[in-house]
Amino acid sequence: MQGREFFITRFVCSTLLFTALSVGLTGCGSMRLYDASKAQSSAAIKQNYKDADPVGTVAVQKANLDALIAAELEVVRDNQQLQLDISLLQMADNDTPMFETWDEDVTVPLNGLGFKDGAAVRAFLNARDEVALRRDQLRGQQRRLVKRHGRKVAACETETKFSDAFKKLSRSHNRYAGTCAKWQTANTDVNAIGGNIGKARRELQAAEQALRAADKAAGDAKKAMAGIKQRHKQAVDAVKAAQGTPDAVRTAIATSAGTLSTELAGLAKTAPGVVAEERVEAVLTLLKATAGEETQVENDEALSKAVLVIGGVSSLAPELAGLVAEAQAPTVSNLLIELQHQVVLLEHAKALHGLEIRRRDIRKARLESYYAEADELLKFADGLCSFAFHTAGKGHPGVQCDSFTVDASAKSCRTATTEIADCALKEPWKKYLKSPPKGDAGREFYKALAAFTRIFPQRAARMEQNFNLIDLQHRENLIHRKMALKAWNNLAQVPIEQIAAYYEAGLKPAEIADLLVKALGFTAVTIGVAQ
């Protein structure tokens, strides 16, 4: 009897010990009892952090910026419409002679844009049209040169003068050189304009140059990155080709990565988006290797390159050292934190590049609005000049309007070849609005009036672009703030979630009781067999 009791006691203890060991081995390597208070506290911390949503404040700020710029643009448009209404009302009600309209709404604005008179405006607009025409011709001619002769020629923007030898290569080459010369002449005339147009053009050129520099830096960084990876591969392959041991190969990987780390650090400063994109791929490679327990860097070229690319990240330096030296898998949580950080850096770089594109587009729109205003001012001036000529019975003036001037004191107007002593512009606008002129004079009068109304939207467009540039500064600051918040959130959120998961995963009393019941049930069966 005593022998059987001893057997039962020993078997129950053995069964419980086996159960405990089984639970421990099937978990994370150790058995840990569930602590309800700690699980609740960690879950509460996780929920409170989620409710705080620090990154969500950026979305609120963006919505505020969207609402602000929309309200500002609406005010600008309403203001410009009000100014137009007031100007038209003054025309309809005031006794102010049309002479003053010429001075205030033609001469002064033209001077501000950078033109001396209507002739300068006409020459500028003609040169601008010439630039567009010759640019299209150059593109077509260059395509034909490539098709017929199998090679591209230097861009007209960079080639100051084509040699006689170039022109004699073929008629196509000679034609291209001739078109290029015409483009350069017209482009020089366009760029010679000062005033507000010259300032806006320089601002656009600066924005375009910044974009080209950024694109070039990114392209150069990609080439440099490819070169760095190739040199790393060559260094490792040289050891392998010399029948080096696995330890020797791992040492070569570590040495090469350390040697090239300075170049990588330089690229990260000049082209952060390019390096961040490479490091995202590298971290994913490390995660894949960790998950598959394939951490022998000497046998995996992709893993070796990942060690190189991610080697400049100080937070992962100990992990990478263990991976290379002893094939120790990096900690997944650290890899995830770094992955999210590199994604943040990549998003930040792309967002800033998008802002630069937007800045270029705004600058271009501002310049185009100046061009459009110059065109409408010229039509307004031509309309007033032609109206004065037709009213005086002088016929259509044509290009004579380039030299059209008014003399308010003498109540006369003239061109270089024609003088009108009794100029119709001495009268107020309201006279002709109440009794509209007929025939050619009436047509030119309303052409001038229509051009006058189209000037205001161009000025409103520039005011809108001014506010858009201010808005761009706010959004750039918001992008920087968003990156900082995301980086901070990345460091805080992952540990919080891991702690919550850790305490939630403990062995609960109910689970222990279930294991005991099963164990004791098995023991009863065993005892019965023993009897």
Image (cartoon, rainbow, N blue to C red):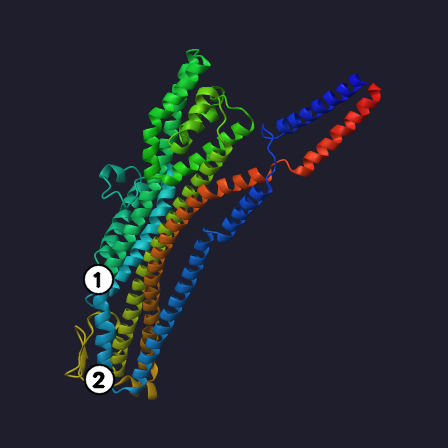
Task: Residue 224: give x, y in percent of width and height.
Answer: 35, 32
The image quarter containing residue 131 is: bottom left
* Residue 174, percent from left and from top: 28, 43
* Crowd around label 2: few <14 · some 14–19 · many ≥20 (10 Å): many
Q: Work out whether residue 467 or residue 158 is closer to the camera in this orientation and state it.
A: 467
Earlier in the chain: of badge 1 and badge 2, it is 1
> For residue 257, which numbered disc appears in the image?
none
Residue in view at x 37 percent, y 47 percent: 140
Q: Is residue 7 left or right of residue 237?
A: right
Q: x and y percent of residue 14 in the render?
A: 70, 22
> Image quadrant of residue 64?
bottom left
Look at the picture and state if 283 lies above or below 379. Answer: above
Residue position marked by numbered label 1 in the rendering: 195
Answer with left or right where residue 496 lies relative to residue 473: right
Q: Amino acid at mark 1?
A: Gly
Quarter of the view holding residue 80 = bottom left
The nearer-to-camera label among 1 and 2 is 1
Q: Amino acid at mark 2?
A: Lys
Query: In the displayed structure, would residue 112 be above or below residue 420?
Result: above
Residue shown at 56%/37% (left/top)?
502
**On-image quarter of the C terminus:** top right
In the image, 19 versus 365, the foreground residue is 19
In front here: 231 or 47? 47
Residue 195, above or below 435: above
Residue 225 in view: yes
244 relative to 28, above or below:
above
Q: Horizontal placement of 402 versus 365: left or right? A: left
Q: Which mark is residue 426?
A: 2
Q: Tag 1: Cα neighbours inside 10 Å, few (<14), some, or many (≥20)?
A: few
